[in-house]
Image (cartoon, rainbow, N blue to C red):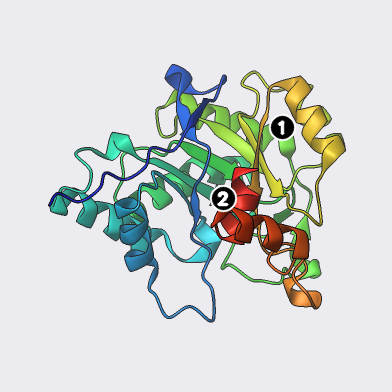
Amino acid sequence: MAAAAAPTVPEIVLPSATGQRKMPVMGLGTAPEATSKVTTKDAVLEAIKQGYRHFDAAAAYGVEQSVGEAIAEALKLGLISSRDELFVTSKLWVTDNHPQLIVPALQKSLKTLQLEYLDLILIHWPITTKPGEVKYPIDVSDIVEFDMKGVWTSLEECQKLGLTKAIGVSNFSIKKLEKLLSFATIPPAVNQVEVNLGWQQEKLRAFCKEKGIIVTAFSPLRKGASRGANLVMDNDILKELADAHGKTIAQVYIIS
C-alpha cells in the first residue's frame, strides 16, 4: 500500500520579497536543544518527510552545515525534487551587524548551507558588537553603535544581488521598526519575535499588520518552561480541548 502523502502547509505571500515569494506559515526552528538526542540533520530530514518546507536557521546556532547537509540528502533521496520547494531562513549575528560585513556574512552562510540563495535573511538582534566569534550571552563591553541604516542598506543590496529573496528583522520593537521604515526602500518582510500564550505581543502584532510586515513566532510552545509550569503545554484548558478532539496540545494551540 502506498504511503500517505505529506500534508500541505498553507503559505503566505511576502509582499516585499523578490517575485512575491510565498512563505509556509509553519516552519521548523533549528536552534540546538541540549536535551535532544536527535541530530539537526536527522530532524530536518524527518521534518521534510512529514511535510515541512520552511526551515529557520541562524549563523549563531551553528547548524547551517547540518541543515545544508539535510537538504542535500533530501534531494538525493527524492524527498523533494528541487531546492526551490523549500523556504530557508537564516539570521545574521550581532558580530556581523556592520554595513561592510553583511554581504560577506550572507555569502558565508550560503556556502555553509550549500545553497545559491536564501528565501529570507533576518537581522537576529537590533544591536551590534565588535566583529569576531559568536559569544552568548553577549558581553556588554563588546557592544558598539548599531548603524541600522547602513546595515539595512547592505541587506537591500543582498536582495538586489539575488543572494536572498526577502529581508527582515528579529526581536524589533515598534520603536525600532518605525525608525527602520523611515528610510527603508525595501520594507522588512518579516519581524520574528517571541509570541505565545504567555507573551501575545498584541500591540506589536497590530503595528506589523498595519505596516504589511509578517510576524513570525519563535518559542510558540515554550513560554514559562524555564520558570516553572509551561503556560502552553501545561495549560488545563488546552489539555481539555486536545482530549476532546483527539489531538495533542501542540496541535490545538498552533492551529488555533
Residue positioned 32% across, 55% down in the render:
68
In which quadrant of the rendered image does the C terminus lie?
top right
47 and 242: which one is in front? 242
Residue positioned 59% across, 58% down in the render:
250
Q: In the figure, residue 81 lies in which quadrant? A: top left
Say which label, 1 or 2, has the lower sequence index. 2
Residue furthest out toward the front? 244
Residue positioned 27% across, 40% down in the render:
83
Examine the rendering and report whether any part of residue 246 can be seen.
yes
Q: Is residue 225 left or right of residue 73?
A: right
Local crowd size for mark 2, using a 10 Å CA cut-off: few (<14), some (14–19), many (≥20): many
Q: In the figure, residue 122 lies in which quadrant? A: top right
Residue 87, how many percent across, how many down?
41, 39
Q: Amino acid at mark 1?
A: Lys
Residue 183, how many percent across, how many down?
74, 22
The alpha-carbon separation of the residues under discs 1 and 2 comes to 15 Å
Q: Is residue 199 left or right of residue 118?
A: right
Question: What residue is disc 2 on?
Answer: 92
Residue positioned 26% across, 44% down in the render:
5
Q: Amino acid at mark 2?
A: Leu
Question: What residue is disc 1 on?
Answer: 149
Image position of 214 with respect to 39: above or below? above
Image position of 180 with respect to 114: above or below? above
| The label number, if any, that marks residue 186 in the structure image | none
Check disc 1 and report its element: helix, strand or loop.
helix
